[in-house]
Image: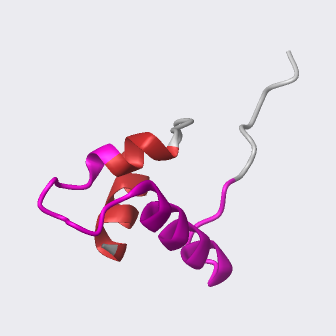
């Protein structure tokens, strides 16, 4: 499941995406796929500094 969460993050790079979209990217065959599971995986990946949410870059025009 870690690979699937990372794949969804990579697929949605540079976009503001809800966790429901990440859950929708996980195949239906994954019986353990639930919102709680996705949140747990995202939290664990953040704690080990694999993923990090950053603010959008805005030009000062």
Q: Residue furthest top?
A: 61
Residue at the image position 75 percent from the left and 44 percent from the top: 55
Residue at the image position 63 percent from the left and 72 percent from the top: 46
Residue 42 among magenta residues: yes
x and y percentages locating residue 43 in the rendered image: 60, 70
Quadrant housing residue 26: bottom left
Residue 14 among magenta residues: no
Q: How many marks?
A: 0
Residue at the image position 51 percent from the left and 38 percent from the top: 17
In the drawing, does residue 53 fall left or right of residue 24?
Answer: right
Quadrant containing the C terminus is top right
The reply to whether residue 3 is in sight is yes
Color style of the picture: secondary structure
x and y percentages locating residue 58 in the rendered image: 78, 29
Span highlighted in magenta in the image? 24-53
In the drawing, does residue 44 fall left or right of residue 11?
Answer: right
């Amino acid at each position: 499941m870690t690979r699937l969460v990372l794949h969804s993050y990579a697929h949605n790079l540079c976009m503001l995406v809800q966790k429901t979209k990440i859950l929708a990217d996980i195949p239906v065959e994954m019986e353990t796929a639930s919102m709680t599971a996705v949140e747990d995986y995202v939290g664990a990946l953040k704690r080990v500094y694999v993923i990090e949410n950053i603010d959008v870059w805005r030009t000062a025009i």
